[in-house]
Amino acid sequence: MITYQHRRLAALADEGRWTELLGAYRRTRAAAVALHGPAVGVAEAAPFGHLIAYGAPPELAARLFDGDGGPDTAAGPADHDAGPLWEVLATRHSWRRLAPLLDPEPIRRLVTHTRVLLGEDLSAEAEPDPEGVPLVLAAWEAAGRQEGGLVPEYLGNGGALRVPPALPATREGLGPVRLPGAGELVPGQAATRLLATLAPWATVSCVRGTGPDAAARTAPAGRVIGGHLPFTAAYPALVRVGSEHPSTGAAHGRLALWRVLAAMTGTARPARAEIEALVARLRCFTWSEPADELRYLHLTLEDPATGLAWAVSGCAEI
């Protein structure tokens, strides 16, 4: 419900009175945390934080994440309205403008990867990623990005335009496929655990065999409407699945996916050359199911070099 307080603070944004709005944000957040706890503090203050992150000059907007206002006044990585406040800020200014202003390491890292997803090459401008994830899009990421925006388009007064995670997005290019018997399960794979973290509402399994062998673990028995597709076409859906909650952003999805790919190569940290080779040989298979509505994912990732295939399949509640 829009209250008088909301209208008054929105008017401050309309008038460009950003310092006053920042002060109101900090007081609101701290008071709500003291009375009701962190979750309520985030919810109460986030609409005003969105206004600041979207419209204020970067020098002031970056202060949302500074603790100089006192305990419980600063936004953290999970503070969100329509999306994380740091992601809203990252969509509004280049890394060159934001880099001197952001001190908290988690915020700085997430903003960096957001700018990379928006097309900036920061490999020579930003500090290396602690996990080794490159600060420039790989060719297969850039190709996938062209399939549709990975970072939501935020609106000034609140809200966002985002593409829901859906794979296959349409039945175009798919046809009847008879699935074989389900492949033999291979337990204990790190990539399986990481895929389950990426898509918590999906069923994830690893089998010894092909993509259709893995699909048979979760897809309807018999014939499905499915087909193979390049990894570049699957990439956007995987990033979106990993960043669909309002408290997470596209940077979370990208980082989580690089962890999955590293695990598939048998390494704990992303080694770019090995991941490039993996992506080049991956065979992806997708299919549709009758229950699919808005948020769903049906995908297998088959690595012919190891003989393993992973299936990720589910339909999230709307």
Image (cartoon, rainbow, N blue to C red):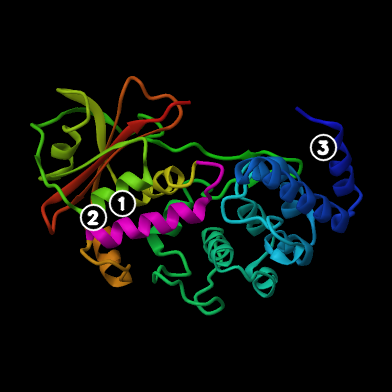
The image shows residue 277 at horizontal and vertical percentages of: 25, 65
* Mark 3 residue element: helix
Instruction: Rate crowding at label 2 as few (under 14), some (14 to 19) or many (20 or more) other CA atoms within 10 Å.
Output: some
Q: Is residue 125 visible?
A: yes
Which portion, as a residue range, is magenta? 245-264
Which residue is the site of mark 3? Answer: 6
In the image, is 286 to the left or to the right of 74?
Answer: left
Q: Is residue 230 visible?
A: no
Query: In terms of image quadrants, where is residue 130?
Result: bottom left
Q: CA distance from mark 3 to mark 2?
A: 46 Å
Relative image position of residue 85 (x, y in whole percent): 65, 52
Precedes in sequence: disc 3 or disc 1: 3
Residue indicated by mark 1: 194
Q: Which mark is residue 101?
A: none
> Which secondary structure lies at badge 2?
helix
Q: Please check the rendered image and state whether residue 76 is part of the magenta-colored stretch, yes or no.
A: no
